[in-house]
Image (spheres, rainbow, N blue to C red):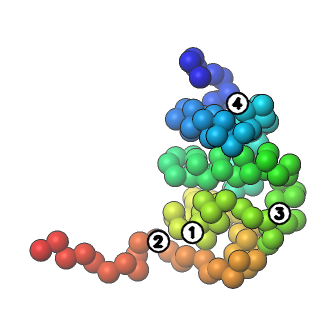
Amino acid sequence: QLSGSSDVYEHEIPGGQYTNLLFQSKQLGLTEKWPEIKRKYAEANIVLGDIPKVTPSSKVVGDLAQFMVAQNLDASDILDQAETLAFPDSVVNYLRGDIGIPPGGFPEPLRSKVLTGRGLEAVEGRPGASIPDYDFD
């Protein structure tokens, strides 16, 4: 990527994530599917609740988009098969609450299906709140 692209706006891909996603798609052997990955990025964002895309949440959206392309899935497949799909760890951790709670909350029933299918409990509140204070002395 040697120049700017309107894809950043059209697909709501943050600029830094755009170049990272392009590199990752090459590493995964999905280079020829780059246009589809960009479309799936916007779709994955909606599946995840139309979240603010900042580090690390933009990576979660990108991981889900590439997973959807690699597995030939759409949004309805994700919801229908959520209990059994082998989602990327970043997606499962996001839905668990490991990086916080998105402003609009988690998408249901997707979150419940993903966690129940893996026997996981949701993180309640701020992820680091249960960590004991560190003694710097």
Q: Which quarter of the rendering shows the N terminus?
A: top right
Q: Residue tagged by mark 2?
A: 127
Taking the image as shown, residue 126 lies to the left or right of residue 94, namely: left
Taking the image as shown, residue 128 lies to the left or right of residue 95, namely: left
Q: Residue tagged by mark 4?
A: 10
State whether residue 105 appears in this view. no
Q: Residue at x 56, y 18 (%)?
A: 2
Sequence order check, earlier mark of 2 and 3: 3
For the residue marked with disc 1, what is the amino acid? Answer: Gly
Do the numbered discs 3 and 1 sit on residues whose CB atoms are within 8 Å? Answer: no
Mark 4 lies on a secondary structure that is helix
Please state the horizontal and vertical placement of residue 42, each as a whole percent of the image. 72, 42
Sequence order check, earlier mark of 1 and 2: 1
**Cα–Cα span, label 2 and label 3:** 25 Å
Report which quarter residue 103 is drawn in: bottom right
Report the disc number at residue 79.
3
Do the numbered discs 1 and 2 sit on residues whose CB atoms are within 8 Å? Answer: yes
Do the numbered discs 2 and 4 sit on residues whose CB atoms are within 8 Å? Answer: no
The residue furthest left is: 137
